[in-house]
Image (cartoon, rainbow, N blue to C red):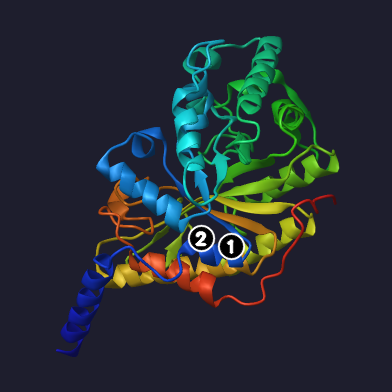
């Protein structure tokens, strides 16, 4: 009887929370500004830029709640150069313009400048000649970053170069990286070799837009014990030792909660908050910044208990990030549960109807209650 009464109270709380008007004394962005951290939403052109009632609501959430925005996969080579030599900036221009028109300022994060074949146009994937690949890479980076110089603040320069899909070796090869044809070069801190295009991409990006923040973005690399954690750290350490102009590492953190309330990564391994903190500290010791570039937490089912677990998980991860001065950003991968990745698992802070969920208040409480966050100069990145 007591259990049923408790469930009824929770259900009533969820109903009330999900129908609270979207007006708060302190929005997330205000709390984030106080903590000197970026928090961001993510939506591409189709879910964000066109003027319709739903997307107007989404823009209002972005404006009120966040101080950064990720343009989804809109900035990938597949979308920006669908045909060789023909650049299509219309949709990404509209995203940038829509964010710039908002009443509150936002940093713009562009995901996936270059990377594995899923984000490259089919015509590019078919090219095998190393000189041709290198020339294409240089031209693409120069044209895209010059076009958005002064507008895009943060770039994923190289995305998903590491093997997280079960291929042999540390690099995302097989049919997944046409840029491997450019060749390999020795690493400074291990006997392994590293794809040459990674260094070239960062050097050309630095030349095209030196003021922007340049990240290497990977999956399964946030906590100790994840598949790519160690080799990602080795890669970043090597790039720093060779004076490659890299500013930060991007963590893709697509997490999920099981039926017992435990937190896992997207591959089904336990996600350790302590392991996450220890891994961040290693990058801080390298004097390199940390950006959570793709963040969401899936739930197993739509129950009050699952919403409570999700709320706690958001609180724990955000608190862990705030405890590390080098953790510069927490960028959601999605805006609401209607446009999110794995939307059936309700992974974001807002419901399909764009109402704040308990997860929102877990995120909010972490920002509100954390004290003593250390500030580090953004330019203090030299080892």
Residue 346: x and y, percent? 32, 55
| Depth check, front residue: 281 or 140 | 140
In the rendered structure, the answer to whether residue 25 lies left or right of residue 109 reads: left
Q: Residue furthest left?
A: 1
Q: Residue at x 71, y 49 (%)?
A: 233
Label 1: which secondary element: helix
Q: Is residue 323 found left or right of 193 in the rendered image?
A: left
Residue drawn 43% across the image and 56% down it: 64
Residue at mark 1 = 33
Quarter residue 133 falls in: top right
Q: In the image, is residue 74 above or below residue 308? A: above
Q: Position of residue 229 (x, y in %)?
A: 63, 51
Q: CA distance from mark 2 to mark 1?
A: 6 Å
Front residue of this view, candidates 99 and 361: 99
Label 2 Cα crowd, 10 Å radius (few <14 / some 14-19 / many 20+): many
Q: Nearer the viewer, residue 284 or 187?
A: 284
User: Residue 226 in the image: x percent, y percent?
Assistant: 57, 54
Q: Which residue is mark 2?
A: 29
Q: How many neighbours does mark 1 have within 10 angstroms: few (below 14), some (14-19), or many (20 or more)?
A: some
Q: Is residue 206 above or below residue 40?
A: above
């Amino acid at each position: 009887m007591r259990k049923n009464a408790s469930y009824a109270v929770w259900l009533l709380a969820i109903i009330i929370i999900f129908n609270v008007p979207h007006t708060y004394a302190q929005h997330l962005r205000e709390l984030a500004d106080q903590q000197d951290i970026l928090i961001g939403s993510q939506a591409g052109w189709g879910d964000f830029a066109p003027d319709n009632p739903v997307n107007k609501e989404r823009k209002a959430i972005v404006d009120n709640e966040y101080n950064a925005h990720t343009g989804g996969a809109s900035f990938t080579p597949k979308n920006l150069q669908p045909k060789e030599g023909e650049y299509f900036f219309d949709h990404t221009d509209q995203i940038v313009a829509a964010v710039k028109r908002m009443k509150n300022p936002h940093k713009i994060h562009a995901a996936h400048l270059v990377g594995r074949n899923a984000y490259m146009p089919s015509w590019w994937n078919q090219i095998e000649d190393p000189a041709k690949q290198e020339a294409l890479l240089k031209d693409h980076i120069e044209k895209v970053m010059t076009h958005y110089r002064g507008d895009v603040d943060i770039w994923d320069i190289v995305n998903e170069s590491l093997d997280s899909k079960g291929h042999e070796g540390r690099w995302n090869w097989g049919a997944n990286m046409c840029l491997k044809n450019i060749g390999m070069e020795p690493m400074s801190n291990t006997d392994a070799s590293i794809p040459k295009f990674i260094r070239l991409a960062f050097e050309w990006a630095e030349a095209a837009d030196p003021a922007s923040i340049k990240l290497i973005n990977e999956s399964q690399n946030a906590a100790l014990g994840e598949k790519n954690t160690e080799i990602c750290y080795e890669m970043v350490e090597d790039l720093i030792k060779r004076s490659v102009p890299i500013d930060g590492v991007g963590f893709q953190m697509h997490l999920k909660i099981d039926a017992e309330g435990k937190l896992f990564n997207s591959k089904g391994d336990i996600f350790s908050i302590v392991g996450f903190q220890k891994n961040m500290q290693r990058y801080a010791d390298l004097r390199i910044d940390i950006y959570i570039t793709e963040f969401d937490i899936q739930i197993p089912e739509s129950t009050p208990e699952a919403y409570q677990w999700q709320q706690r998980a958001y609180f724990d991860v955000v608190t862990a990030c705030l405890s590390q001065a080098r953790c510069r950003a927490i960028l959601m991968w999605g805006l609401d549960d209607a446009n999110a990745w794995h939307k059936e698992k309700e992974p974001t802070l807002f419901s399909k109807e764009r109402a704040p969920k308990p997860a929102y208040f877990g995120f909010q409480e972490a920002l509100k209650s954390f004290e003593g966050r250390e500030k580090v100069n953004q330019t203090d990145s030299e080892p």
